[in-house]
Amino acid sequence: MKAVIQRVSSCQVTVGSDTVGSIAGGFLILLGVESGDTEKDAEKLSAKISVLRIFTDADDKMNLSLQDIDGEVLVVSNFTLSADCRKGRRPNFIGAEKPERANELYEYFCKCMTKNGINKVEKGVFGADMQVSLVNDGPVTIIINSGDLA
């Protein structure tokens, strides 16, 4: 499971003309579920993200977590994070989990974020063509792979 985390001062996701999720400040998480990922991957990844200290404190040091600032999260499914670009010019997505299972793990990840103390967890629409608007704060962008976590 891969996550691209962007520290944002605001963001929203729309499907067509409908806003389906928005937050004032916290993290935009683009989440890619890969073949073989499990609930344990979602648990490890959500636990790490909820305590990741990348918000600035009074001394302007990255020392505060989402929990510390009562930050919000917008999670958007993104199978293209599983792209394999090693051959040719067109990425292949064979490493992405099948949609039904990927959606189950996406939903489970979102529930885990709530269990980890994040009070507002907004979502995109799994499998939809979405438009994401954000104000990247910093900019701060972190990439985490659940397979790299202890």
Image: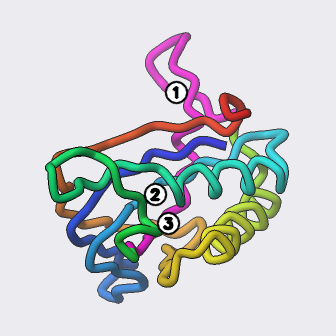
Q: Secondary structure at mark 3?
A: strand
What residue sits right under mark 1 in the picture?
91
Foreground residue among 26 and 3: 26
Quadrant placement of the C terminus: top right
Foreground residue among 140 and 98: 140
Cα gap from disc 3 to disc 2, whole angstroms: 5 Å
Q: Earlier in the sequence, mark 3 or mark 2?
A: 2
Report the amino acid beneath label 1. Pro
Q: Earlier in the sequence, mark 3 or mark 1?
A: 3
Numbered badge on residue 75: 3
Tell me the mark number nearer the camera, choosing from 1 and 2. Answer: 2
Total number of numbered labels?
3
* Residue 2 falls left or right of residue 39: left
What residue sits right under mark 2 in the picture?
29
Q: Position of residue 137 (x, y in %)?
A: 18, 55
* Residue 38 falls left or right of residue 44: right
Residue at 59 percent of width and 69 percent of height: 126
Q: Secondary structure at mark 2?
A: strand
* Residue 17 falls left or right of residue 124: left
The answer to which image quadrant residue 132 occupies is bottom left
Q: Is residue 64 magenta?
A: no
Which residue reaches farthest top? 87
Asked if labels 2 and 3 touch by Cβ distance under 8 angstroms, the answer is yes
Residue at 65 percent of width and 49 percent of height: 45
Cα gap from disc 3 to disc 1, whole angstroms: 23 Å
Numbered badge on residue 46: none
Q: Earlier in the sequence, mark 1 or mark 2?
A: 2
Report the amino acid beneath label 2. Ile
Q: Secondary structure at mark 1?
A: loop
**How many C-alpha atoms fall within 10 Å of the one at disc 1: few (<14), some, or many (≥20)?**
few
Residue at 38 percent of width and 62 percent of height: 27
